[in-house]
Every structure is written in structure tokens, then in C-alpha cells.
Amino acid sequence: MSKKILSLLLTGLIGLSTVSCGYPVRRHNVAEEKTVKHYTGFFAVLKDDCSESERIRSVIAEKTGAVCEEKWLTRNDSRDEVISIMINKADYPDFIYAGTDHSKFLEANAYIPLENYIEKNQNLKNYFTEEEWDRIKSPDGHIYIIPCFSKVNMYDTNTIHNDEAFWIQVRVLKWAGYPDIETPDEYFDLIRRYLRAHSEDENGKKLIGYDILTEGYLYFCLENPPQFLDGYPNDGCCIVDRKTNTVIDYNTTPTAKRWFQILNREYHNGTIDHDCFVMTNNQYFSKLSEGVVLGMVDQWWNFGHYVEDLPDECAYVPLGLTIDKGMTEHYHSEPAFDTSQGIGVSVSCQDPDGAVAFINDLLDPEIFTLRMWGEEGVDYTVDEDGVFSLITPEPEKAVTDLSFSEETEEPAEESADETEEDISDYAYPYFPIYKGMNPDGINAYSPEYQPSEFYNKLSEIMQECFDAYGVHTYVELLDKSEKNAPWYPMWSYTNNFTEDTPYGRAKKNMDEVKHEYLPRVVMSDDFEAAWEEYMQAYKSCNPEFYIAELQNEVTRRMNK
């Protein structure tokens, strides 16, 4: 895919990963005039730097009279350590985007209430409806953070699937004649057959049929597929039956047992990487970046950055599998309204009025277009119908697969390795944005979602793949998303659980048991015995406390 589009996708989408960086904040050469206010921000997101958007940031500084020096996490840092040191010192930058660690800053009283400032800034006040602002409020009635990626203008324009799926390299599908793959059994059968025909790549490296990321919180790649295989969307922490609004524990369903029995079988067949339960996250990403892994379950925002330079034939395609044929899957969802993550203003900020006004200015239609598209005449052109097209000063590598990436519905908190002067990165990517359409109502909010910029930049093999399946985007490879239920997503609730409650302690214990026992289940020579041992350990965690609290929250959200 084009480096420009790839970089945009990787930083503009939402999801969260482990990253870090140190103080003091490094200053960029952005509008150093005395009239420009300088703010600082910490973003718990993996990102190299902001050099690619420096030109645009300078233009924004001239127009708004303010600039923010952004501190990102790097691959060499410990996310927990960086956050702990900051909280212990109680010395914060002006802005904080803590991602899934928001509750830590909230408990440390690191944020100021924002509701009175929001009232004075119309772009920000109108960013959410009154009902949505109410949903964002903490139990004490205050608004401490502003979700950055939960607002869709007009309608969703996703061309890629940024979330979880069963991924497979396009060369495997091409080799098999682009078959319809609906179930895990069909998926692994295809991978086994390909491995028998191609045990090594053209460089003599041994191919890995299927790999699993299991370190830390990213072990969702191992433990949560049962919710998807039963046809449910990514509530993350449970299944919610749409007909009865009943919470179901996906860890104990018949499908969960079938899924892990399949993994057990494929582990002993040699399809699954035998190092998967002992390797680090970096080792996993390294194998993906080498192109030797044929398939895996993962979320695009989590791994997309690591496969951006793969050969076209090694690009990954998302598959929406279900445990049995003929079921409707829900891997792709409308953007979630996530109240658990967002940007806040810290108690250390000396100019909260100006800081909130800066957020407000970044939502101005002119400034927003600058952030997402760059400068007219430099980065993009506008035709007589008002449609934007990127200016490409030199031939670009074609888009292979999702070799681009969020949000997450988090933006994919990855960065790109681009150095060209042109806009190849969002400016202020972790400040609030509108997803969907640009405020002009004509263009997509950013280039990677512009139809005219997408299909034509696909590689030849990916266009062939799309043509074979009768689609034009990655999202179209999956079943059409449904309107989100009122409770969706439930992970936005559990992200803030602490061990101060019975259900919070249950969650922690459940996670620990799954980390310990699921690898044993997959590797065991006696699956039934290992599964029974796992279930006994799991039940000892009192998961009923956890499920009961989730049920209470579903009911609360339904009645709101």
C-alpha cells in the first residue's frame, strides 16, 4: 500500500498498545513566535514522533495561536513504569491520553473537570449530543476526558477492517483458487494443505501455519475467539444475547471448548507455532514482519504496523469465521462509543481555558481538514465537485492488503516509518476527530477512506483477490455490521474495573487463570482432562460476580 495511506491509517485508527517515552518533551520546529501558546501532552500510545506532520502543525499553530508538544511511548519503555512514575510525582503535562489506563489517572485525581470549559467552546460542545455527554460523565457527575474516536459524522466510511478477525495471507487464498472459508476447520485445513505444498518460503525460511500472541493483555488473540465464532460482536468481555439482553460468559460455552479442542489438534498437527506460549510480543511481531506466518487471530490495529513492508503476496486478508457453516458473523462493528478512553486536561495545566480552547479549535472544519488531509494545493487537489484527491509527487508502491491501519476503534496506535515532507501522518492524531465524513459532507474524513483513493492503490494480487470475492474493500469481505446495541461495547465498562470490588477481583483472577491454564489446554496430550482442570480453576475465581455486574450494566445502559 502507499506509504502515505499506510501511515495515515496506522496513526488515525483507534486501539491501544504498549508504548512509552521520557521527559522532557522534545520540541519540534513549530511556530516559535511569542504569540503561540505551547502546551504539552502525554499519550500512552506507541509512536515514533510527529516529524511527518510538523509542517501541518506549524500551519495550525499560525491559525490557532497554539501548539502541543506530544510525548509518545516508545518500544523501549515500560508503559506501566512511565505511568507509575508520572502519577507518583504528580507532575503532569497539560494533556493526558491514558488509553486503557485512564482509571489510574482518575484515581490519582490527575484530571480537572471539563464540563464548564466545554460549555464555553461551541465546536467541542456540539461534538457530542447532550445525551452522549451524559454518558461520558463519571459517577461523581463530572466530565474528565473527551473520547477522541467515538464520533461519526453522517455515516461510517471504513474501507478496512481495523478490528479482530482470522487473518490469512493472500497467497494462500490465491493458491487455493480463492475458496470460501467459513469455519475454523476449513481455515486450518487450507493452511495445512498449503504447508504440505510449501514448507518454506523462497528464501528457505520455514513457514509457520498459525501463530498466537499470548503475552500480557494481548492474549485476547488466544482467549476471545469464542465470542466471534458464535456470531457475536466484540463486546470484549462477554456475550450479550440481543433477544433477551442476557449476559453470557463466552469462556464456558460449548463453542469455547470446541475452539480450544481445535487449537489442541492443530498444535499437535504442527500447524501452530510451538514457541507461541513462550515468545514475547516483539518475537511475535518479528515473525509477522518476516512474512513467515500464514495465519493468526489478531486485531489489525495491533499488528498492522509490523507488516507494512511485506511483499504483496504476503499481505493479510480478514476472514469472518463461525464455529459452524451458515451462521451470520459480526466481526465488523460500527464505531463504538467508548467512554473509557479519551483526552483530559491535567491538574498541572496552568492555562486550562486555553488548553480546552485548543481542543475546540482542532475541531473547526478548516483545521480538521488540515489535520486529516493537509494543505490544499500541496497535499491534495479539489475538483469542480469538491472531491479531494491526494497529490502524489512520485510513483507510490501499491496498497497490498490492510497494510495500513486506530483505531482503534481505537486508532491503531502504531506509527509509520515515513520521512517524506508531504503529509503522511495525521496532525494531532489523539485529539478528538470526526470519523465518517469530512465536515463538508462530500469527502471522507481522511484519505484512506476516500473511495477514489482506495481501490486504485491496491496491489495487483489484492485487486485480483477482491475481484474473486466480488468486493471493493476489506470491510466488504465480512458480513455487514449491524447498528450497535445500546450496551455496546461492554469492554468500555470493564476497562475501569479495580480490585476494590468483588467483580473486579473476579476479573483479575479470571485473567490470571486463563493466562496459566489455556496454554496447558492447547498443549495437553489429554485435552478432556486439561479442559476439566481449567474449568475447575476458572470456577474458583467466582466469575458469577463478574457476570452479574456486567448484567447490571447492560440493564443500566438499556434503560438510559
Image (spheres, rainbow, N blue to C red):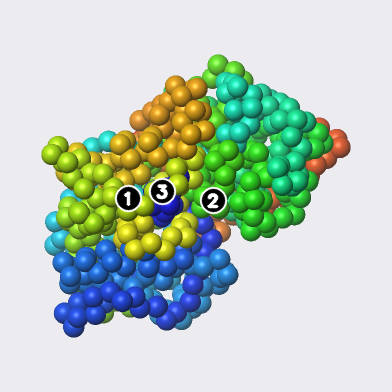
- Counting residues from the N terminus, which is met first, the one under dot 2 or under dot 1? 2
CB under 8 Å between discs 3 and 1: yes
Seen from the viewer's position, the closer of residues 228 and 318 is 318
The crowding category of the residue bearing disc 2, from other C-alpha atoms within 10 Å (few below 14, some 14 to 19, many at least 20), is some
Q: Position of residue 372 (x, y in %)?
A: 28, 53
Q: Element under label 3?
A: loop
What's the amino acid at mark 2?
Asp
Q: Is residue 11 visible in the rendered structure shown here? A: yes
Q: In percent of the image, x 52 and y 33: which residue is there?
A: 461
Q: In percent of the image, x 57 and y 47: which residue is there?
A: 310
Outermost residue, front side: 394
Seen from the viewer's position, the closer of residues 515 and 48 is 48
CB under 8 Å between discs 2 and 1: no
Q: Compute the Cα span from label 2 to label 3.
A: 13 Å
Q: In this figure, which residue is indicated by the disc labeled 3?
A: 396
Q: Is residue 297 visible in the rendered structure shown here? A: no
Seen from the viewer's position, the closer of residues 89 and 507 is 89
What's the amino acid at mark 3?
Glu
Q: Position of residue 303 (x, y in %)?
A: 55, 49
Q: Compute the Cα span from label 3 to label 1.
A: 7 Å
Q: In this figure, which residue is indicated by the disc labeled 2?
A: 309
Residue 392's label in the rendered image is: 1
Indicate which label's residue lies in the foreground, 2 or 3.
3
Q: Position of residue 309 (x, y in %)?
A: 54, 51
Indicate which label's residue lies in the foreground, 2 or 1.
1
Q: Quadrant of the N terminus?
A: top left
The crowding category of the residue bearing disc 1, from other C-alpha atoms within 10 Å (few below 14, some 14 to 19, many at least 20), is few
Q: Where is 57 relative to 211, above or below?
A: below
Outermost residue, right side: 525
